[in-house]
């Protein structure tokens, strides 16, 4: 009789293990760092326009223009760290930001179609989803 229960118990444990793995996997996806920032974003501040593209693989690219003139055209790696967005710049075709430069913005608010940061200089900027 005990032998008859063993396959049922193993099946129950297997189902429990599969369910647990599924729950953990779903929780991990929902809490992936930076998940809500992946996409294309644009900000207008004064005469300048800034655009970022945050990719799910941890890379980013973007540019800054002032009245249509290109000031910076950059790329690098990004990640979330608590309430911060960390940027490691690897390239700027204009030469404004040296490779190896790191920066951090404080993420104040994030929604589906916008986010607000406080930059290192204390200014606040609102980025809207652009695409």
Image (cartoon, rainbow, N blue to C red):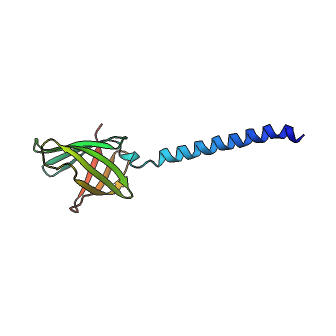
Residue farthest to the bottom, as pictured: 122
Quarter of the image where the C terminus is located: top left
Relative side of 17 to 103, left or right: right
User: How far across and down, in percent of the image, does residue 44 sit?
Assistant: 20, 48
User: How far across and down, in percent of the image, does residue 5 sit?
Assistant: 83, 40
Corner quadrant of residue 21: top right
User: How far across and down, in percent of the image, does residue 14 sit?
Assistant: 69, 40
Quarter of the image where the N terminus is located: top right
In this rendering, the count of numbered labels is 0
Instruction: Using the image, determine if residue 105 lies above or below residue 26.
Output: below
Residue farthest to the right, as pictured: 1
Residue drawn 26% across the image and 45% down it: 76
Q: Nearer the viewer, residue 74 or 100?
A: 100
Corner quadrant of residue 42: top left
Residue drawn 74% across the image and 38% down it: 11
Instruction: Using the image, determine if residue 65 lies above or below residue 102.
Output: above
Residue drawn 22% across the image and 53% down it: 101
Q: Nearer the viewer, residue 3 or 81?
A: 3
């Amino acid at each position: 009789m005990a032998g008859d229960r063993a396959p049922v118990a193993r099946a129950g444990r297997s189902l429990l293990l599969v369910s647990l793995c599924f729950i953990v996997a779903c929780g991990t996806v929902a809490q992936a760092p930076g998940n809500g920032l992946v996409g294309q974003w644009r900000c207008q501040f004064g005469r300048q326009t800034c655009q970022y593209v945050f990719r799910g693989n941890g890379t980013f690219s973007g540019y800054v223009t002032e009245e249509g003139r290109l000031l910076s055209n950059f790329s690098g790696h990004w990640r979330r760290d608590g309430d911060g967005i960390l940027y490691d710049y690897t390239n700027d075709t204009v030469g404004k930001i040296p490779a190896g430069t790191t920066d951090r913005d404080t993420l104040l608010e994030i929604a589906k179609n916008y986010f607000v940061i406080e930059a290192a200089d204390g200014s606040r900027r609102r980025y809207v989803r652009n695409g």
